[in-house]
Amino acid sequence: MPGAVNLGALDRAGIIREQLECQVHCMPSDPPGIGTQTHGLLQMECAAAGCALVLSNIEAFPEVFGDAAIILPVVGRYEPSLERRITAQDYAEVVVELMQDSSKWEEASRKARALAECNTWSIVVDRWETMLEKVMEGVKVG
């Protein structure tokens, strides 16, 4: 693709540098199996960097990111409200709109960043520990 650059393998500092330069993180994800996309760590890192998020409505994305992301159906899925299947063009149009309308991008970026600020690593670990404790309470040993 003209203008696309393959950066190759990046160290952690390089990844953070690229995330901070990015304005939109678009993930039209269709994971290979159930439970393979349960948290969205990369998406949360991008949110912390102030990227506007455009994500698919698969697995944890709607629950974790909610109104802090633009959530679209998975590419190839039928969307009854549009009376057609979703295509990559639908995602591209949302990204272009965000890039052309600075007020929409600023709002999306602000929402993503605010969500990330409420989901620090220590808060996420506490939530997982609480959830796992509740699960273990329901498990009988022996």
Image (cartoon, rainbow, N blue to C red):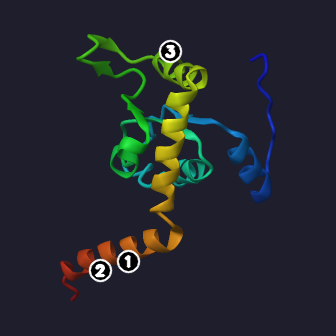
Asked whether 28 or 76 is in front, the reply is 28
Q: Nearer the viewer, mark 2 or mark 3?
A: 3
Q: Classify mark 3: residues with Cα within 10 Å, few (<14), some (14-19) or many (20+).
A: few
> Which residue is found at the position 49% from the left and 74% from the top?
122
**Amino acid type assigned to the residue bearing label 3 in the image:** Gln
Q: Reading the chain from its start, which is encountered first: label 3 or label 1?
A: 3
**Amino acid type assigned to the residue bearing label 1 in the image:** Glu
Q: Residue 60's spot in the image, x, y percent?
A: 37, 49
Point out which mark residue 89 bears.
Answer: 3
Q: Residue 38's spot in the image, x, y percent?
A: 41, 53
Mark 2–mark 1 contact, CB under 8 Å? yes
Q: Is residue 22 left or right of residue 139?
A: right
Q: Classify mark 1: residues with Cα within 10 Å, few (<14), some (14-19) or many (20+).
A: few
Q: Residue 124's spot in the image, x, y percent?
A: 44, 68
- Give the residue pinned by disc 2: 133
Q: Secondary structure at mark 3?
A: helix
- Give the residue pinned by disc 1: 129
Residue 53 visible, this orientation: no
The residue lying furthest to the front in this view is 103
